Image: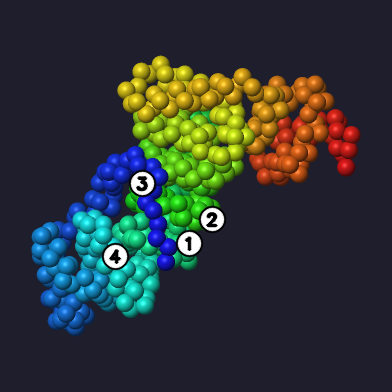
């Protein structure tokens, strides 16, 4: 098995504790606090022969132990601990008891991260997968069971000396992605419902006012928290991109989610951009226009801070300077300079934000200075957000640049055709068809 370095080796300053604080207010944590008070009658499970005497002895001792007693109990009974917990998860069917057992496991791991190896060692002894019993619980209909299990899986995957196996990792990341997608579906339903209910004469609703009212998967914070942990490990990042994870994050962020979810999901994008390859690919998913839109609406400083940190990485991390240049131009086109100007007026206390604003201002201003009209055009086409900017109607521009649509195997021409096939926005469609007409007019073999 591969061992992995923690992301902390690469980015020492990641706010680890701050993320743990996020979990404290989530629905999952509130429910866990309540479930902890509903003690299980282990005796009844022993009497009905649903658990063995050995498992009963261990679980009663563990359940009644304080922190120091638990420590010494685990010192002498590591294998028994894993064996008992997995036996109970396999043999008990009552949701309430499964919930209680999962909280015990999660609390045990939270108390000491190295305890994730207890399950690893037991699985190795039995030559079984450590993941099987936990991944099965992700299929349970109970939301608390699924999400508490997910939290345990993330901890074992991130805190263990060994990486998660590829097929199990694929299954888990797909599950996390599907939980995020439920939020988009809920939003679409809500929008449809709103369309049916509103009359043609009703006033338009300001989206910022209804920010908190959109229905979301109630465990969304917990799902996002698991992703925040997983994305710290480089190998897991590529696996997440492979299951179309970035598109899903951006689709959720394009819907109206609350500030906490915005922060957590943009945090995931930020951590992804520490990998130079991913930083180079990121704007193919239109991350810059979507982040720029959120930045212009943002009233929460932590959301602003994390977006600026994403933008900075998109300029600093790519190894190809041409990609960094394209990212700068995309930011300029998305009116990021204007937002930086507004932020500067606010007299912010946070040194990180001030430093990032200065960095971005300097780099974006420089890119404006040496911006050719073709660079500007190419970036606009790649963003998919076409509008009647001056270059489109400039005969001089088309005379000089029509053949350049053939570069990189007709890259820009292919994008324009793709937009005509896929986009519904009438403005984008009219500009794209106009541009193709100009290409045909000014490039001798354009019609062919």
Q: Earlier in the sequence, mark 2 or mark 1?
A: 1
Distance Cα–Cα, label 4 vs label 2: 28 Å
Q: Which mark is residue 8?
A: 3
Q: In this picture, is 247 found above or below 108?
A: above
Q: Nearer the viewer, mark 4 or mark 2?
A: 4
The x and y percentages for residue 358 are: 45, 22
The x and y percentages for residue 362 are: 51, 22
Tag 2 residue: 242
On screen, residue 383 versus residue 204, left or right, reads right
Q: Secondary structure at mark 3?
A: helix
Q: In this figure, which colouring scheme has been used for the structure?
A: rainbow
Q: In this picture, is 38 found above or below 339?
A: below
Q: Earlier in the sequence, mark 4 or mark 1?
A: 4
The x and y percentages for residue 146 are: 34, 61
Residue at 39 percent of width and 53 percent of height: 5
Q: Secondary structure at mark 4?
A: helix
Q: Residue 160's quadrant in the figure? A: bottom left
Q: Secondary structure at mark 1?
A: helix
Distance Cα–Cα, label 2 vs label 1: 9 Å
Tag 4 residue: 117
Q: Earlier in the sequence, mark 3 or mark 2?
A: 3
Pointer 4 local density, CA inside 10 Å: few below 14, some 14–19, many at least 20: some
Pointer 2 local density, CA inside 10 Å: few below 14, some 14–19, many at least 20: few
Distance Cα–Cα, label 4 vs label 1: 21 Å
Quarter of the image with the C terminus is top right
């Amino acid at each position: 098995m591969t061992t992995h370095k923690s992301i902390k080796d690469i980015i020492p300053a990641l706010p680890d504790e701050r993320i743990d604080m996020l979990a404290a207010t989530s629905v999952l944590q509130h429910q866990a606090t309540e479930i902890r008070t509903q003690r299980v009658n282990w005796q009844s499970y022993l009497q009905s022969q649903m658990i063995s005497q050995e498992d009963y002895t261990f679980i009663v001792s563990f359940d009644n132990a304080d922190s120091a007693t638990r420590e010494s109990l685990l010192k002498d009974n590591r294998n028994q601990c894993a064996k008992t917990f997995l036996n109970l998860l396999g043999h008990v069917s009552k949701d309430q008891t499964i919930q209680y057992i999962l909280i015990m496991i999660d609390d045990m791991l939270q108390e000491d991260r190295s305890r994730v190896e207890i399950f690893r060692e037991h699985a190795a002894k039995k030559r079984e997968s450590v993941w099987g019993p936990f991944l099965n619980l992700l299929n349970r209909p109970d939301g608390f069971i699924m999400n508490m299990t997910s939290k345990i899986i993330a901890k074992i995957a991130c805190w263990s000396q060994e990486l998660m196996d590829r097929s199990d990792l694929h299954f888990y990341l797909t599950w996390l992605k599907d939980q995020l997608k439920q939020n988009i579906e809920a939003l679409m339903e809500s929008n449809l419902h709103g369309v049916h209910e509103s009359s043609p004469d009703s006033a338009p609703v300001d989206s910022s006012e209804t920010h908190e009212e959109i229905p979301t998967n109630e465990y969304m914070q917990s799902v996002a928290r698991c992703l925040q942990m997983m994305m710290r490990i480089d190998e897991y990042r590529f696996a997440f991109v492979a299951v179309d994870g970035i598109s899903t994050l951006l689709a959720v962020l394009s819907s109206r989610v609350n500030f906490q979810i915005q922060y957590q999901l943009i945090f995931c994008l930020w951590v992804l951009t520490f990998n130079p390859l991913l930083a180079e690919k990121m704007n193919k998913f239109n991350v810059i226009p979507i982040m720029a839109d959120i930045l212009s609406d943002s009233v929460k400083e932590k959301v602003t801070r994390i977006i600026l940190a994403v933008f900075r990485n998109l300029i600093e991390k790519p190894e190809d300077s041409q990609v960094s240049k394209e990212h700068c131009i995309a930011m300029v086109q998305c009116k990021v300079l204007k937002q930086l100007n507004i932020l500067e007026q606010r007299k912010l206390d946070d040194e990180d934000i001030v430093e990032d604003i200065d960095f971005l201002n300097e780099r974006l201003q420089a890119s404006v200075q040496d911006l050719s009209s073709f660079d500007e055009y190419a970036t606009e086409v790649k963003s998919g957000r076409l509008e009647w900017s001056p270059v489109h109607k400039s005969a001089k521009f088309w005379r000089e640049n029509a053949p350049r649509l053939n570069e990189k195997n007709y890259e820009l021409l292919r994008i324009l055709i793709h937009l005509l096939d896929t986009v519904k926005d009438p403005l984008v469609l009219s500009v794209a068809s106009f541009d193709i007409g100009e290409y045909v007019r000014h490039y001798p073999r354009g019609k062919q």
